[in-house]
Image (spheres, rainbow, N blue to C red):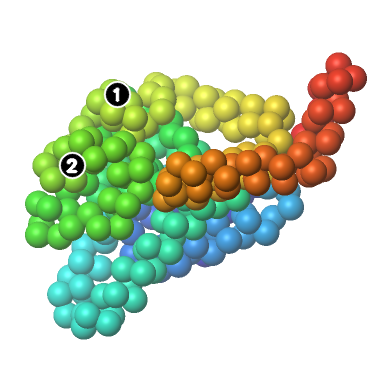
Amino acid sequence: MDFVRYEVNNRVATITLDRPDKRNALSGEMVTELKTAFGQASEDENVKVIVLAAEGDAFCAGADLAYLQQLQSNTYEENLADSSHLMELFKMIYEHKHVVIARIQGHAIAGGCGLATVCDFSFTVPEAKFGYTEVRIGFIPAIVKVFLLRKLGEGKAKQLLLSGDLIDAGEAQDMGLINWVVSADELDDKVAAFAQRLVTKNSGQSMSLTKAMIAEVQSMNVEDGLRYAAEQNARARGTEDCQKGIASFLNKEKPQW
């Protein structure tokens, strides 16, 4: 792959945006490579957790300028296909069977902020800025809106999406957009330590099922949601991980995940 790196170490797959000269801006090719990398992580038996990282000063500056120029001459059908391409990536990350941690070492703007939004956890440096600036160029933050409403609720989503304002890391954390703000010299260690905590202390099967349930239950009414939860609870009890975990607990042992 030309714009994305894929590496595995200690059961953690690191998927790295590697286009620093363009501030890791999203192009059709980069989106394709990201989908390939996340697909590879899904099939990789050596992977339990994913870290999404980036090279250079920016995490991701949003859409590539050449890409934006191309949009002006596209037909509706071409734009729909291209938009669906990005939608599939965001959905793939949001619904991925593995936990995805964003390691944000610089600004995450527009589509780049969207990438951070769909990850399950996020670490950032204090200097990073976040925002959805689409409305400032006559565009709309259409796809990320679906996920941001779930993550922050209507009020905060409107504040970000309709203003187009950039916010700093502290405000992003206060809003719930980002989980943790750490210094640049601690970023790698903090992300690695958290990833290893998930790898060694948690059942991968349990994390996967819980993540899927969080995505599914929000579209259900209370009665359907509770019925779905009870069914999943019953299914989980019969899984190998649950039987192993309960046996370890009863024997006062730590399960080896």
Closer to us: 111 or 245? 245
Residue 49 to residue 123: above or below: below
Residue at 71% in and 42% down: 234
Amino acid, disc 1:
Asp
Kindly tell me whether residue 10 is visible in this rendering: no
Residue at 25% in and 25% down: 171
Circle 2 is placed at which residue position?
A: 158
Residue 36 percent across, percent down from the top left: 54, 64
Residue 34 percent across, percent down from the top left: 48, 59
The image quadrant of residue 156 is top left
Residue at 55% in and 52% down: 96
Tally the numbered discs.
2
Q: Is mark 1 on a helix, strand or loop?
A: helix
Residue 181 percent across, percent down from the top left: 38, 24
Residue at 39% in and 69% down: 85
Amino acid, disc 2:
Lys
The image quadrant of residue 241 is top right
Give the mark toward the camera: 1 or 2. Answer: 2
Residue 17 percent across, percent down from the top left: 44, 51
Q: Which quadrant of the rendered structure holds the C terminus?
A: top right
Of label 1 and label 2, which has the lower sequence position? 2
Residue 94 to residue 254: above or below: below
Residue 174 tag number:
1
